[in-house]
Every structure is written in structure tokens, then in C-alpha cells.
Image (cartoon, rainbow, N blue to C red):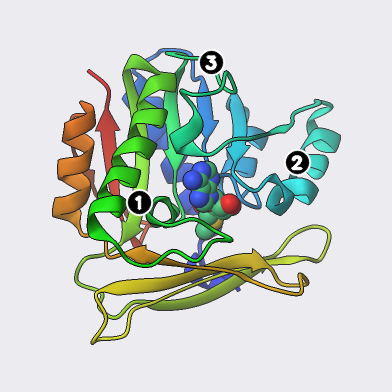
């Protein structure tokens, strides 16, 4: 269960809320969760009163959380179907708009490949896709805004994880990431547990140095932060100057 990774779930939600509020120094939050999946953390940030928009390449993962959130808040929020690297090509999301963008849950590694496709590891291509994805996120951010991004820790090799968590509908979302010691890439998959197939793809091995160089190429200021309640992933707070 996902909750096993975050036994003190309320505290990590509170801590991320604190990061958002303190980074914004009094500015009114305009937050985008760029890969909301099944709403982990960000649904609760919205319930805590933060102004959240939701996007994901696969909005189906979030159908039940968004319905539940709308019922609780009396809103009509939708999950915008959008892939990070496409933000600038289609007017899916407003440019220069958000002051806080979230890309959490070890999701950014999926930029290197393509869910539902047979992607073979190709470091040059992967680097281009990381840059294109960061550029997409940069484009929807206000100057001075922050991108919260996390990933498995460099020192965790091999990293292996299979998790799911129950949504209010009873469905589980599962993801899996695995690196065999002799491989230069990770295998990752994600899907709904009751789907006949899990979407499989390969991802290039993203270490912190590569992430930093891609972020700086796009123009972000790069900073790593430590969260007391985030024991699973390394967290980066990238600022658009
Ligand atoms: C592990 S889930 C993360 C869910 C949630 N953000 C969390 O913190 O647990 C990864 C999500 O990233 C989404 N995703 C993968 N590639 C994407 C892309 N290129 N653009 C936008 N979303 C993407 C997937 O559809 C999936 O919902």
C-alpha cells in the first residue's frame, strides 16, 4: 500500500503545504499538480484550502479522486489531459501562470520514455525528453515560481518498489520501478490494478547530476531540499528566475 511509504501521511501533506506557503512568501498560491495520478497529496492540499489545478498525461488514473474532491468542495474541477513536453505546443495550460508546480511521486522519470510505447534506452533521446518536459513546465510558470520535483535517491541502486493505494472507489494505482545491477536503465510500469495490462516502459537512469544539468539548461535555479517526512525520495525545488 502507498500508505506504507508514508505512515504519517497527514504530516507529509502538512509539510508540503508549509513548503508551498513559505516559498511563496505571501503570494496567493496558484498551484498545478502536473501529474496528479490518483491525487496522492494534492487532493488533500486542495481539501486544505489551496488553489489547485490538476493535469496528467493519463487522467483516467484520477477519475475517482476528482469526483470525490468535487463532491466535497462543491466544485467542478477537471483533470487536464496534458503531457509536460506538449504544454507549449497546445494551448492546454496557461503560459506564465502558476507560481507553484508539482511533479512528485517519482514521476519525472517517466519523461524519459513513453508509457504505452516500446521505448529502448537511449541516453541522448532521454536527455532531450527531460529537457523538453522541464521546458513545458517552465513555460506555464510565473517568473519567481517554483517547481517541486522528486525522484528516487541516487544512492538507492537497485531501486525496487511496487506500491498501490486504495482510492475511494476501491481501485488501486500501482507503479513499479526496478533496476537490475547489470542494466544501465530502469524498468518502470504504472497502471490501474484492475486494468488488464500495466503500462510498461523503460526509463533512462536519471541521476542528480543529469537532472541538475537539464534543469539549468532550461533556465531553472536548482536547489535540493530536505523534508522531515519525505524518506522515500530526493526533493528539488527549482525556481524560474
Ligand atoms: C507515480 S504517479 C504519481 C502520482 C502523484 N503525483 C503522487 O505524488 O503520488 C506518476 C504519474 O505521472 C503521470 N505521467 C507520466 N508521464 C507524464 C507526462 N509526460 N506528462 C504528464 N504526466 C505524466 C502518469 O500518468 C501518472 O499519473
Q: Is residue 238 above or below residue 129?
A: above
- Residues 102 and 28: in front is 102
Q: Residues within 10 Å of mark 1 (few under 14, many from 20)?
A: many
Mark 2 vs 1, N-terminal side = 2
Q: Residues within 10 Å of mark 3 (few under 14, many from 20)?
A: few
Residue at image mark 2: 66
User: What element does badge 2 sit on?
Assistant: helix
Callout in the foreground (2, 3): 3
Q: Is residue 115 visible?
A: yes
On residue 150, which mark appears? 1
User: What element does badge 3 sit on?
Assistant: loop
Q: Residue at x 42, y 57 (%)?
A: 113
The answer to whether the residues at label 3 and label 1 have Cβ atoms under 8 Å apart is no
Q: Residue at x 23, y 45 (%)?
A: 225
Q: Is residue 196 above or below residue 151?
A: below
Residue at image mark 3: 94
User: What element does badge 1 sit on?
Assistant: strand
Q: Residues within 10 Å of mark 2 (few under 14, many from 20)?
A: many
Distance from the alpha carbon under mark 3 to that under mark 1: 23 Å
Quarter assignment of residue 200: bottom right
- Residues 9 and 68: in front is 68
Q: Position of residue 235 (x, y in %)?
A: 30, 50
Q: Position of residue 99 (x, y in %)?
A: 42, 20
Amino acid at each position: 500500500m502507498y500508505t506504507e511509504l508514508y505512515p504519517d501521511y497527514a504530516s507529509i501533506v502538512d509539510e508540503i503545504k508549509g513548503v508551498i506557503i513559505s516559498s511563496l512568501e505571501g503570494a496567493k498560491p496558484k498551484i498545478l499538480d502536473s501529474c496528479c495520478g490518483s491525487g496522492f497529496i494534492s487532493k488533500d492540499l486542495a481539501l486544505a484550502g489551496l488553489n489547485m489545478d490538476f493535469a496528467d498525461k493519463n487522467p483516467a488514473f484520477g477519475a475517482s479522486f476528482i469526483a470525490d474532491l468535487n463532491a466535497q468542495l462543491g466544485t467542478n474541477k477537471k483533470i487536464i489531459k496534458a503531457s509536460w513536453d506538449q504544454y507549449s505546443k497546445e494551448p492546454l495550460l496557461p503560459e506564465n501562470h502558476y507560481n507553484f508546480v508539482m511533479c512528485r511521486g517519482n514521476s519525472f522519470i517517466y519523461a524519459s520514455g513513453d508509457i504505452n510505447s516500446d521505448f529502448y534506452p537511449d541516453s541522448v533521446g532521454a536527455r532531450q525528453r527531460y529537457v523538453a518536459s522541464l521546458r513545458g513546465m517552465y513555460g506555464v510558470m510565473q517568473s519567481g515560481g517554483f517547481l517541486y520535483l522528486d525522484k528516487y535517491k541516487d544512492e538507492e541502486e537497485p531501486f525496487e518498489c511496487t506500491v498501490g493505494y486504495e482510492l475511494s472507489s476501491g481501485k488501486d494505482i500501482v507503479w513499479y520501478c526496478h533496476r537490475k545491477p547489470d542494466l544501465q536503465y530502469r524498468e518502470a510500469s504504472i497502471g490501474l490494478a484492475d486494468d488488464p495490462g500495466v503500462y510498461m516502459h523503460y526509463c533512462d537512469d536519471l541521476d542528480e547530476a543529469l537532472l541538475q544539468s537539464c534543469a539549468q539548461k532550461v533556465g531553472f535555479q536548482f536547489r535540493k531540499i530536505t523534508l522531515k517526512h519525505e524518506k522515500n525520495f530526493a526533493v528539488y525545488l527549482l525556481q524560474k528566475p
